[in-house]
Amino acid sequence: MLAPAALRLVAFMGLAALSGGVAEAQPAPPPMRSDPEDAVSDRRPSSDFRPHRGLYLNVLAGEGELRFSGAGEEIAGRSYDIGLGVGIAAARQIVVYGDLYEAHVSDPFANTSLVSELDLHGFGAGVKYYFDPSNVFVSGGLLAFQITQTGPIGGPSNDETTHWGAMARLAVGREWWATPNWSFGLAGELKLGRTHNVTYDSPLTYEYSVKTASLLMSGTFGAPASEPSAYGWAGAAGDGTHTHDGFYLGVHVGVGWLKITGPFPTTGTGTPIGVAAGYAPKDNLILFAAYDRSTAAGLSGEIQHLQLETLGPGVRYYLEPSNVFLTAAVLAARISIDNGDAGDERYGYAETTRWGLAARASAGKEWWISRDWGLGLGAELLAGRTRTSNDVQLYWTKAASLLATASFN
């Protein structure tokens, strides 16, 4: 009677041993651990941290040497340069952008005429490549540009603006990361361009060349494709969807009415275009700097062409939940006018005024079309005052515009 029970006991123990052996042969599951790269911490990024993706914004400021020569004339002096570029990273570490550029020379050397100021302003496009992991960059681009020279106050009138010309740019520099999105650095830049004037009622053409060399400070914003938490930075809990916070970029284009009163009064319609960049210190409240340009042709009176430029700071507030916005700005402003004659820069009438003051107010509404982008419509009023280039007479400017707007926030 005991034999069957003993056999059952031996079989049970054998199965238990076999089961234990199989269990021991299976690898133990790996211990649960958190990946430090996925953890959100307050450490700074390493040198190979590169959010050169998505939106790109670049601001330049510095000094250089500008030389303008041709037709036996040579003007040269120290320049003060500023630039603004806006674009997108088309591929990893490759950025394509459009930009605005200004250079100003005070009291330049001139071999044949009296010149108190020389200004270069232009717009164009370029491409930038960042080397991995040093964040050294090389950039190149093309600008459409004009040169304006201004005679001394009370002296003979030597004010003159060239026709639009073409300019090539090449820059090399390096930037260092300061935040998940912002980097700051230095760059050296060379520019070479050609432009011309056409004399009044004559087929003769005066060719001019422009050469500059500049040392620039660079500040760059790059919006990464993924959330900042993916790069190990604190403060990335909120996704910022449909929220007016952090970095701000705005552009607008439209149609408007312009009126100037002064030595040569005129009225007509213009096409305003502008760009603004800034930051929201609190939700829905944005502080920004803006550059705007409005051009008009076929005006009343003796003036046929008019260009109004403004540059300066402003504030915008968005009302919730309607996304209606109110904007106010105090600006530096100047106007450029001519009478439309061939070669008027030499023998007709053309003038770029001194910088004056202007105030601008606008209101509108935007609709969200993505996580961060909004499109909308707005209306704007502007009033300003500036002096003629010889600082003797005043021009008053009034403008009203209807605008199509786009903002990233």
Image: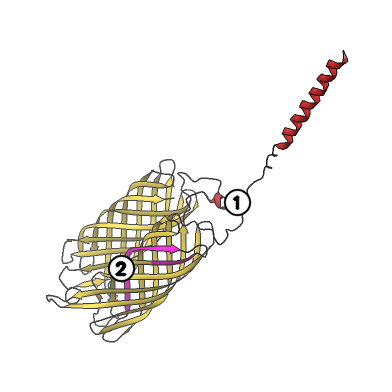
Asked which colour scheme the image uses, the reply is secondary structure
| Image location (x, y in percent) of residue 264 | 20, 68
Q: Which of 200/217 is in front? A: 217
Q: In the image, what residue type sits under mark 1?
A: Glu
**Disc 2 or disc 1, which is closer to the eye?**
1
Sequence-wise first label, 2 or 1? 1
- Residue extent of the magenta highlight: 111-139
Q: Is residue 276 left or right of residue 239?
A: left
- 369 or 361: nearer the viewer: 369
Whether residue 107 is visible here, answered yes or no, is: no
Q: Look at the magenta stretch and give its main secondary structure.
A: strand
Whether residue 122 is in magenta: the answer is yes
Residue at 30% from the left image edge and 68% from the top image edge: 386
Q: Position of residue 388 (x, y in %)?
A: 27, 72
Residue at the outermost top position:
1
Residue 202 horizontal/vertical position (percent): 12, 76
Q: Which residue is mark 1?
A: 37
Using the image, tell me which numbered label, if any, was put on residue 386. 2
Q: Residue at x 24, y 63 (%)?
A: 260
Query: Is residue 9 at all visible to an observer of this figure?
Result: yes
Q: Nearer the viewer, residue 340 or 212?
A: 212
CA distance separating discs 2 and 1: 56 Å
Q: Which mark is residue 161?
A: none
Q: Quadrant of residue 320?
A: top left
Residue type at mark 2? Thr
Q: Position of residue 188 (x, y in %)?
A: 43, 73
Residue 229 located left or right of residue 324: right
